[in-house]
Image: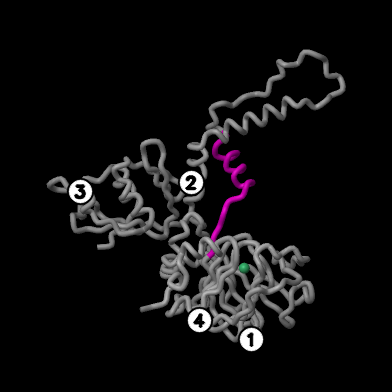
Amino acid sequence: MYNRPFEQIDKSEFLAKYWQKAPCFFKNAFEVPPSFLSADELAGLSLQEEIESRLVIQSGNNKPAAQNADAWSVEHGPFDNSRFANLPESHWTLLVQSVDTWVADTRKLLTDFNFIPRWRFDDVMVSYATDQGGVGPHADNYDVFLIQGSGERHWRVGAKGDTSEAKTVIQGMCHLDQFTSIIDIVMQPGDMLYIPPDTAHWGISIGESIGYSVGYRSIQTNQLLALITEKLAEKIDHQQFFTDAYRDTPNTSNYFEDQLVDWAQNELKQLANQPDVLADLLSKQMSLSKLGVYQNDNNFDINELNKDSTIQLDDEIGVNWHYLNDKIRLNIEGESFDFDLQYEKVVKKMASFSPISLTLFNFSPKMVDFPPVLTSLINRGYIKRVD
Ligand SMILES: [Fe+2]
């Protein structure tokens, strides 16, 4: 029986005590540590233009930027093979983002975190570090599960919110000048650390090591407003001009009148009072996967399916679902697909990337009686056969 991270702690207990609240260390979370790619394979990814990668190099000893700013440098990929031939033996790390998109096997990691909805997931980042390599002391805006693949790293982690000390920005990296550790451990292969947002952390490689980071995302007010501006403005059906028919006395001093603020408040309230519109807007946006570069390679002939067939939504896809009036709306990569309520079970299975036996559907003598919307999902290549 293999160890899995949430065999040590109940998922509900983790959510209640730690998720978004406090860091948490899982010793031996994975009995079989992840080893989806070698250092050479990771370097190979960083040579490609469409893949986001960074090299963080220190020329001095391992001190935060505040004490040794000149020692840190950041380079952005794509890199040339010759770059790797000219790196020092220690004190650097290579970070590659969205490896889940480029190396399908790494998405197996996500099954351990499927109790956090997919629309919160951002990407799997993989880092290779030489001895003493790391990105320095910092805090992120998002949740992350750090999983040690190979080698060891010394991690220090502060309390959530304890990040108000001075910061030094160096080449786009924001280093905390200092923080107080509440976790101070050497992570070994298979160990895992959960780091909530706004939590100081600092990892330093001990010898060569590879780490996997399952990262999450959220949405901010400014993004919400941008969405409303960009995608919804034309759809608001109560486009109104401000009017000042209330004016009954001259305003010769150019006094700014409260009525304009009242008008603005009312307009925003009317928008906020349309939850279906906001649900549509936000659910579509949050169904977009980070890169949205889904490669359609699931073409199969729908007529080849029979009662013994099993289908499944491709786990590369960004997805979520919600109720909308008397329908169930499935959002995939920014597009909506509406199902009748009788397909609720099918949609839930589909959106959780579970296999769906076609015995759930009626069969006519020759072919399966799919709802047309499912047929269009299949024709779009979002569905794969798993039988
Ligand atoms: Fe981080």
Mark 2 sits on what residue?
283
Q: In whole angstroms, how far apart are the C-alphas of marks 3 and 1?
A: 60 Å
Could you tell whether 250 is left or right of 72 in the image?
A: right
Q: Secondary structure at mark 3?
A: loop
Which residues, given as a range, are shown in magenta?
215-233
* Mark pair 1, 2: CA separation: 47 Å
- In front here: 361 or 375? 361
Provide residue 280's location: percent of width, then percent of height: 48, 41
Q: Which residue is mark 3?
A: 368
Q: Is residue 156 above or below residue 243?
A: below
Determine the quadrant in which ligand 1 lies. bottom right
Report crowding for label 3: few under 14, some 14 to 19, many 20 or more residues within 10 A (C-alpha): some
Q: Which residue is mark 4?
A: 189
Please state if 305 lies on the left or on the right of 99 as rendered: left
Determine if the magenta segment contains residue 74.
no
Residue on which the image places disc 1:
89
Mark 2 to mark 4: distance in Å? 37 Å
Which label lies toward us, 3 or 1? Answer: 3
Q: Is residue 368 left or right of residue 6?
A: left
Q: In the image, is residue 252 above or below residue 90? A: above
Give the percent coordinates (x, y) of residue 306. 18, 55
Nearer to us in this view, 124 or 255: 255
